[in-house]
Image: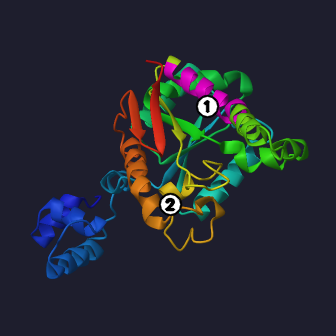
Amino acid sequence: MRVTIADVARAAGVSTATVSRVLNAKGEVDPGTADRVRGIIARLGYVPSSRAVGLARGSTRTVGMLAPSLTWPWMSEVLQGAVDAVEAAGYGLLLFTCHRGRESMVQFAEQVSARAFDGLLVVEPEDEIDAAWDTAAPHVPLLIGSTREETRLFVPRIPAIRRLAALPAGGPTLRRALVAAVTAAIYGAPARRFAARHAAAGGTAHRYVVTWAALGNPWGAAHTVDLPLLFGDEKAWASAGLLRGASWDDLQRSARRVRAVWGAFARGEDLGDRLEVPGALTVRRVGR
């Protein structure tokens, strides 16, 4: 007979909540009690349910994979590569196929809604991608966007534009206009289209624009300027040219608020119709 958490609690003379706290290293438990619970676990051979542990920790340590069919000639190689990468990171793989059509997609959508995995890999025939997204959209909130001047790192390096930007009359204005136009075409328009199709399929979609830039910095709100707002410490970004002109305290005043927005989204909170971190970020709901 399978040993349950209730069996462990009964043998240790504690509540199941205490056993759970010991297993997940959450909450304060008297060291002597924790040692006794761990001893009972070892003696009884209790193995926690991976699903229950995942719910308690907020992580399933599982990646979902949606594939069209296992009969495709190259699918075995794709699956093996996915398994190798996922297992190397300490995760398991949960496989779904589209072999039974809509029935398969409904089952897949239920698992997405139940947060049965932490990440998702999709291998889907191009003519069926829209159907797959439409099925998943109502269960997957979307936050998509870019920085305000994504292409400022690249466009000014084009020789012809560099020469035009060097003109004393109107050069800098022309460069800014070209950066804005190329950023909108390559980053902004695709993000808007994807967010709109997600919302049209019944999903919740928000589009963001990172506007933060170090004062006087020649790169402005360029590609990757969002990263120091979200990740790393002062030492990690000490030599970053994108941050020259801003102190670490200046950056953190905006970064804390930006991280709060990302954290709210990750927790499944609604970001509302309009949200702004002045001088750093704008977020707008799409499709309402």
> Please, what secondary structure does the residue beneath circle 2 have?
loop
Q: Which of the 4 image quadrants contains residue 271?
A: top left
Res. 191 mark: 1
**Residue under the image location 38 percent in, 27 percent down:** 273
The residue nearer to you, when weighing 93 against 161, is 161
Q: Is residue 150 magenta?
A: no
Asked if 200 appears above or below 86 in the picture, the reply is: above
The residue nearer to you, when weighing 56 against 157, is 157
Q: How many marks?
A: 2
Residue type of the residue flagged with mark 2: Phe
Please give the residue where the numbered disc 2 appears in the rendered image.
231
Question: What is the chief secondary structure element of the magenta stretch?
Answer: helix
> Please, what secondary structure does the residue beneath circle 1 have?
helix
Determine crowd level at label 2: few under 14, some 14-19, many 20+ residues with C-alpha closer than 10 A. few
Q: Between disc 1 and disc 2, whose residue precedes? A: 1
**Residue under the image location 64 percent in, 48 percent down:** 222
Place of residue 119 in the rendered image (x, y in percent of width and height, measured from the top left): 52, 46
Cα separation, mark 1 vs mark 2, equals 23 Å
Q: Which residues are magenta?
A: 183-199
- The residue lying furthest to the front in this view is 169
Determine crowd level at label 1: few under 14, some 14-19, many 20+ residues with C-alpha closer than 10 A. some
Q: Going by the image, does 202 lie left or right of 171?
A: left
